Amino acid sequence: MTEARPFSRVVRVDALPQDGQTVTIEATPAEREALASSFELPAIAALTATLRIEPWGRGGARVTGAVHGELTQICVVSLEPFPATVDEAVDVQFAPQAPVESRPPAAKETLSLAGEDEPDPIIDGRIDLGALAAEFFALGLDPYPRKPGASFDPPHDVSEENSPFAALRRATPRRSD
């Protein structure tokens, strides 16, 4: 059973032109609403991606380009909604998924010391560009969004005497070392 994705644009890797192709995708209002709900955002006004897909390696593909989004976030200081923008560069390699019987056991997995990520899998000969764009959009979201000009001012009446722990401090004898 496959999971339903709120934003999906599937491309067959075997149908790619030898010199690659450029694709521009845009989320519909219903897709933006589903993504906003999924990412717990008040709204996504626009989500587009311009992606270049080129053959890479043996049966693989490389996707480069950019994702752009216009959205509304909630300020962590004032709790007010405010407009924000996401612009993320995309550069991902995909490789055919190895058959289960030819995969090494989990204990024998190797890690790349060169710092390169392993290619993402091509599933059933397809790459979902919409899911890729949604992933990079999510990566570009500020986890602690702050509305421009918002500042946190701590309460001014915080002192040791006004602290809820002041009575505890007075009741506990202090050690002298």
Image (cartoon, helix red, strand yellow):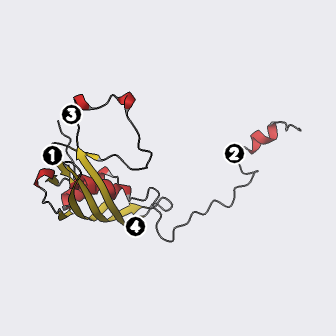
Q: Quadrant of the C terminus?
A: top right
Going from N to C along the chain, the mark reached first, 2 or 4, is: 4
Instruction: Say which amino acid is labelled 3.
Output: Pro
Question: Could you say which disc has been placed on residue 5 in the image?
Answer: none
Mark 3–mark 4 distance (CA, rounded to whole Å): 47 Å
Asked if residue 36 can be seen in this view, the reply is: no
**Mark 1 highlights which residue?**
125
Assign a secondary structure to mark 1.
Answer: loop
Which residue sits at x=37%, y=55%? 139
Residue at image position (43%, 49%) is 114
Marks 2, 4: nearer the viewer:
4
Image quadrant assignment for residue 137: bottom left
Q: Residues within 10 Å of mark 2 (few under 14, many from 20)?
A: few
Q: Disc 3 marks which residue?
A: 99
Q: Nearer the viewer, mark 1 or mark 4?
A: 1
Quadrant of the image containing the N terminus = top left
On the picture, is 149 further left or further right than 45? right
Q: Position of residue 49 (x, y in %)?
A: 25, 64
- What secondary structure is found at the residue carrying circle 3? loop
The mark nearer the N terminus, 1 or 3, is 3
